[in-house]
Amino acid sequence: GENVEQHPSTLSVQEGDSAVIKCTYSDSASNYFPWYKQELGKGPQLIIDIRSNVGEKKDQRIAVTLNKTAKHFSLHITETQPEDSAVYFCAASILGAGSYQLTFGKGTKLSVIP
Amino acid sequence: DAEITQSPRHKITETGRQVTLACHQTWNHNNMFWYRQDLGHGLRLIHYSYGVHDTNKGEVSDGYSVSRSNTEDLPLTLESAASSQTSVYFCASPKDSSGNTIYFGEGSWLTVV
């Protein structure tokens, strides 16, 4: 089955700096890669996703890049703010195969220092 | 707005007792999932369902069961609770017809003593 590795497990940045979280996946058939943000005591919230026919996607201060050849994808947060502090999870899935399961990385705890 | 809700949000139970966690979604979607979240393991799939009367085992299904008698609900049952099942449990379901974008409930914190 699919295996998703996520790095780093913890990340501290100064407010205003950029943060990058990286994930690798094992199954070359995976074609959908969402990112979730989880605040303390809450459920994971989808923040951005990318499909394998796209190399990069942006949404304001958040961007995701995908390298299918290397089987890795990354989350980029620019101009970080204290409210970006949370645990971030990457995930991988295969769309269109009748299966809708997500395989998650183990998470990255991001701390933005004011 | 349609949503996904879980209950109870917090529960303490004793080893050996049967426990059921409820999950209800108002998106009328066929797909529903149960995950558990543990430090160092991230989110792991317990069981999932693609429609009424359909249930499937996930990565960590031992000691758990689900049933799907209608579209809106997928209750998760711990047949005989064990301390290793102390965890946070999340139910999830897609909102739209494509089924691609999955949204999570707020979680159920379960402690087995």
Image (spheres, rainbow, N blue to C red):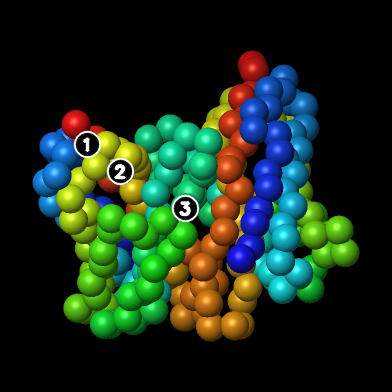
Is disc 2 surrounded by few (<14), some (14 to 19) or many (20+) residues within 10 Å?
Answer: some
Q: Secondary structure at mark 3?
A: strand
Is disc 3 surrounded by few (<14), some (14 to 19) or many (20+) residues within 10 Å?
Answer: many
The residue depicted at 79 percent of the width and 68 percent of the height is A54
- Left or right: B54, with B58 as reference point: left
| Labels 2 and 3: the sequence-earlier one | 3
The residue depicted at 51 percent of the width and 68 percent of the height is A101
Mark 2, mark 3: which one is toward the viewer?
Answer: 2
Q: Judge by depth and name the residue closer to the eye, A18 or B37.
A: B37
> Do the CB atoms of the residues marked 3 and 1 lie less than 8 Å apart?
no
| Labels 1 and 2: the sequence-earlier one | 2
Type of amino acid at the residue the image marks with label 3: Arg
Please give the residue where the numbered disc 3 appears in the rendered image.
B44
Please give the residue where the numbered disc 2 appears in the rendered image.
B85
| Labels 3 and 1: the sequence-earlier one | 3
- Left or right: A74, with B1 as reference point: right
Is disc 1 surrounded by few (<14), some (14 to 19) or many (20+) residues within 10 Å?
Answer: some
In the rendered image, residues at marks 3 and 1 fall on the same chain: yes
- Left or right: B26, with A40 as reference point: left
Please give the residue where the numbered disc 1 appears in the rendered image.
B112
Chain for disc number 1? B
> Do the CB atoms of the residues marked 2 and 3 lie less than 8 Å apart?
no
Separation of residues labelled 3 and 1 (CA atoms): 19 Å
The residue depicted at 32 percent of the width and 81 percent of the height is B54
Q: Judge by depth and name the residue closer to the eye, A62 or B38.
A: B38
Q: Quadrant of the N terminus of chain A?
A: bottom right
Type of amino acid at the residue the image marks with label 2: Gln
- Left or right: B97, with B80 as reference point: right
Task: Decide if residue B29 is in sight here.
Answer: no
The residue depicted at 75 percent of the width and 44 percent of the height is A22
Q: Secondary structure at mark 1?
A: strand
